[in-house]
Image (spheres, rainbow, N blue to C red):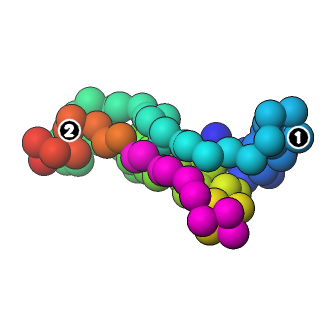
Amino acid sequence: MTDTVSCKEAIANTERACGPIDVSVNRTRITRDGTSRKMEADQWRAVFNTNLDSMFNVTRQIISSMLEREFGRIVNISLLNGVKG
């Protein structure tokens, strides 16, 4: 879900097979345990690319259809660490 093109294709295929998407639960996540002091830059980018870009890539593909139909639900689930931090 971090790749914009493959995400767009996956959603288009799903909508062709099943119809418009009414609900999206975004829970894609990875954790690279450690404080930012101990994290490498590539670990930091991997967390943000997976945890945030995937939500953006999915939501961006379905939001217009939901708004046009005046119906839809998007649920974003965060890591517990995001709350504890």
Q: On the rendered image, what quadrant is the N terminus found in?
A: top right
Drawn side of residue 54 relative to residue 38, left or right: right
Residue type at numbered disc 1: Arg
Residue type at numbered disc 2: Asn
| First of labels 2, 1 by sequence position | 1
Q: Residue at x 63, y 60 (%)?
A: 66
Q: Which residue is drawn at 20% across and 38% down?
A: 81
Residue 20 within the magenta-colored segment of the rendering: no
| Other residues around mark 1 within 10 Å, as few (<14) / some (14–19) / many (≥20) | few
Residue picked out by circle 2? 81
Question: Which portion, as a residue range, is magenta?
Answer: 68-76
Q: In which quarter of the image is residue 17?
A: top right
Q: In which quarter of the image is residue 79?
A: top left
Residue 62's x, y, as percent?
A: 67, 56
Check the image and name the residue furthest to the left. Answer: 84
Q: Does 57 appear above or below 39?
A: below
Residue 71 within the magenta-colored segment of the rendering: yes
Drawn side of residue 17 relative to residue 59, left or right: right
Q: Which mark is residue 16?
A: 1
